[in-house]
Amino acid sequence: MWLTRRMSTVPAPELGAVLHLLRDGRSRTRAELARTTGLSRSTMSTRIDELLRLGLVAPVGDAGSTGGRPAATFALAPASRLAVGVDLGATHARIAVTDLTGHELAGHLEQLRIADGPDIVLDRVATVLAELVTGLDRPLGDVVGVGVGLPGPVDHMTGRPTKPPIMPGWDGTDVVGALRQRLGNIAVLVDNDVNLMALGEHATALPDVEHLLYVKVATGIGSGIIADGRIHRGAQGSAGDLGHIAVPGAEPVRCACGNTGCLEAIAGGGAVAARLTEQGVPARTTSDVVDLVRHGDLRAAAAVRDAGRSIGAVLASCVSLLNPSAVVVGGSMSRAGEHLIAGIREVVYSRSLPLATQHLRVATSIAGARAGVLGGAHAAAEHAFAHPALLTRDAAVSAPESAAATA
Ligand SMILES: [Zn+2]
């Protein structure tokens, strides 16, 4: 179904169909490609020649003799085009350049305050991105798309941040336009950072898990929902906003959102640090908490496990509602080791119905701190395969505009 939709959106539909087929990395003969796509042998030969000229496809070898000359086989050339993932947090920017299969070719991490506003932050992102691509000896025109994750709510239709609490000056910013202004006609997708982390975890570590709940535990708490292999965003794009669900039976602690007893106010990194400080163990940030746990501080370990229990209490409802087969825990607090996961597991398994937890895995993220950039690059590559004109255009020719991530 979606193949037809893809084909109808490109000027040369056959090219899109061939690329879509070859995306799995397998090599095929012209005859095989013609048979599967329903194109004539001669049309297929022309298309293959075109893809070879564009560098998108490479000859691999022969498929063995069928009596006469061995038939040449062709495969996608993954490094022929580039995708970029950008993960912006409250105080960091991470950028990765990947090939079309998500293999990272270059990466960069630096301290960058999102609160400095869109002009400063996006200037810096554009500069680093261009340097990374140039460092690979490639033109910017080889980039088929940039997937950007922002630490706040993003309107799914426009790709603009919407009243993001920790991003002063960003409300309603045209991030797509701002980056295209700096980088030229590159397709830009903007999404909430946790959605891209969920996508990155799914694409790189758990491709076979169709129902996955990715939970980011850091200063803030949020989640990304993969349902039927796709991101579930809800009506306005705010699905997965775990941080402001009330923890059952919790103290009425005041939350930054104005409510009391929110998960973030009870179990977020800042909340745990504040509680430890009250107990005479000075801590200010999530990193302080993680450092304390890693240095064997028992009170810190107990506080993290407690936070895990509160998260588990909210997740138990989510597990009953969504029936995921994996709950993946990422974010900086997950670096505190098994204590967080142990607390989460304890409550999720005891509070959810047996059918929901029978095959449920609760585990720490495998993609780790790179989940967001890998998800962003993956979304950009997905988008390009869905709009093959982005792949088949020659470098430096203009690309169609796009807003929110479609993957
Ligand atoms: Zn709240």
Image (tube, grey):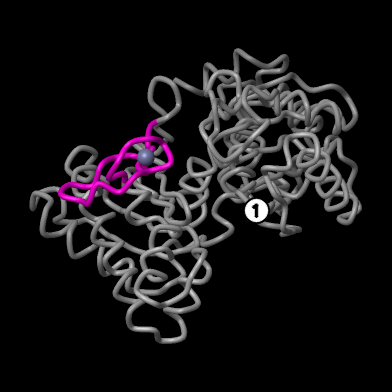
Q: Residue furthest bottom?
A: 296
Q: Residues within 10 Å of mark 1 (few under 14, many from 20)?
A: few
Q: Residue at 34% of width from left, 47% of height from top?
A: 213
Query: Is 95 or 33 nearer to us in this picture?
Result: 95
185 sits to left or right of 386: right
Could you tell me how many numbered marks the image carries?
A: 1
Relative to 393, say whether 291 is above or below: below
Q: What residue type is labelled 1?
A: Thr
Q: Find residue 1 and report its horizontal and vertical position in percent.
A: 44, 20
Residue 92 vs 254, above or below: the answer is below
Question: Which percent across, then down, holds residue 248?
Answer: 17, 47
Residue designated by label 1: 91
Q: Main secondary structure of the magenta part?
A: loop
Between 142 and 278, the residue placed more toward the observer is 278
Residue 116 is left or right of residue 163, and the answer is right
Position in image of residue 287 (x %, y %): 53, 68
